[in-house]
């Protein structure tokens, strides 16, 4: 079993088992969660294939199973299902046990606008760095969507993301070279800002934030349509 697959199994096993917890009963949300995960995954995988083929990032075969789909390791495709599921589960757990833990509406709006402006500026000032531009604009779009939809989700997600960062730092840290020789995923630093927290490119934090927020917003919209 490859190291990447072991990380995915460890990340997904506990949330999956705890989905049947009597209090949370997260399995009842699967009809909303899985369609969202698959739709968002499709978009991210398309860009992942493109960026892999262009050498913006790549994968170390030493830590992979050797099975590839659309130029991507099987583990990388599973990443877009397992990690969002675990993150959404953790977000819902925090909300269940701390329902009042959210930002004031006014602060949330200011933070959304500030981050949109910041993300666009980062993209404009770094047009020669494909990964930076890609994720900055993707982050700006999802924040704008949250603002236009007048969604309450960011008010809690800004806080729950801090909790999500704990497993993120461990898993993504290993993937990018912490605690192991070499790295599972390598990056072409000429295509990003070259700034890292431990071994993790700063863009990866925006990548994770945007991917999970897209899912949460989509789940919200699916629920509204289904429950009309």
Image (cartoon, rainbow, N blue to C red):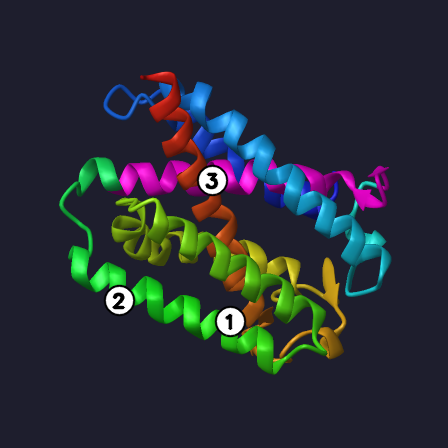
Q: Report x, y in % for residue 176.
A: 65, 64
Instruction: In this rendered view, identify the residue nearer to me: 119 or 62.
Output: 119
| Dot 3 alpha-carbon crowd within 10 angstroms: few under 14, some 14 to 19, many 20 or more | many
Asked which secondary structure carries label 2, the reply is helix
Query: Which portion, as a residue range, is magenta?
Result: 66-94
- The quarter of the displayed image where residue 46 is located: top right
Upstream in sequence: badge 1 or badge 3 = 1
| Dot 2 alpha-carbon crowd within 10 angstroms: few under 14, some 14 to 19, many 20 or more | few
- Quarter of the image with the N terminus is top right
In this rendering, the answer to whether 47 lies above or below 121 is above
How far is the residue under mark 2 from the one under mark 3?
22 Å
Per the image, the residue denoted by label 1 is 120
Specify whether residue 144 is painted magenta. Answer: no
- The quarter of the displayed image where residue 28 is located: top left
Q: Residue furthest front?
A: 148
Residue 224 visible? The answer is yes
In the image, which is nearer the foreground, mark 1 or mark 3?
A: 1
Q: Residue at x 17, y 61 (%)?
A: 106
Per the image, the residue denoted by label 3 is 215
Q: Are dots 1 and 3 in contact, CB under 8 Å?
A: no
- In the rendered structure, the answer to whether residue 180 lies left or right of residue 87 reads right
Upstream in sequence: badge 2 or badge 3 = 2
In this rendering, the answer to whether 181 lies above or below 163 is below
Asked which secondary structure carries label 1, the reply is helix
Q: Report x, y in % for residue 76.
A: 71, 45
- In the rendered structure, the answer to whether residue 122 lies left or right of residue 130 reads left
- In the rendered structure, the answer to whether residue 153 lies left or right of residue 173 reads left
Specify whether residue 77 is painted magenta. Answer: yes
In this rendering, the answer to whether 64 lies above or below 17 is below
Instruction: In this rendered view, identify the residue nearer to me: 180 or 29.
Output: 29
Per the image, the residue denoted by label 2 is 110
């Amino acid at each position: 079993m490859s190291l990447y697959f072991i990380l995915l199994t460890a990340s997904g096993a506990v949330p999956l088992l705890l989905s049947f917890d009597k209090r949370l009963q997260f399995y009842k949300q699967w009809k909303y969660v899985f369609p969202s995960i698959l739709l968002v995954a499709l978009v991210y995988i398309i860009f992942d294939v493109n960026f892999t083929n262009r050498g913006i990032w790549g994968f170390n075969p030493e830590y992979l199973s050797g099975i590839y789909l659309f130029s991507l390791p099987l583990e990388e495709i599973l990443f877009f299902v397992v990690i969002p599921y675990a993150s959404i589960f953790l977000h819902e757990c925090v909300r269940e046990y701390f329902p009042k833990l959210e930002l004031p509406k006014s602060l949330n709006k200011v933070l959304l606008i500030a981050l949109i402006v910041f993300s666009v500026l980062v993209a404009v000032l770094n047009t020669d760095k494909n990964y930076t531009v890609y994720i900055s604009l993707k982050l700006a779009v999802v924040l704008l969507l949250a603002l236009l939809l007048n969604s309450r989700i960011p008010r809690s997600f800004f806080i729950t993301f801090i909790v999500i960062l704990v497993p993120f730092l461990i898993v993504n840290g290993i993937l990018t070279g912490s605690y192991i020789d070499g790295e599972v995923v390598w990056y072409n630093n000429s295509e990003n800002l070259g700034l890292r927290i431990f071994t993790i490119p700063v863009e990866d934090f925006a990548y994770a934030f945007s991917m999970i927020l897209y899912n949460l917003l989509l789940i919200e919209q699916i629920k509204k349509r289904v429950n009309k």
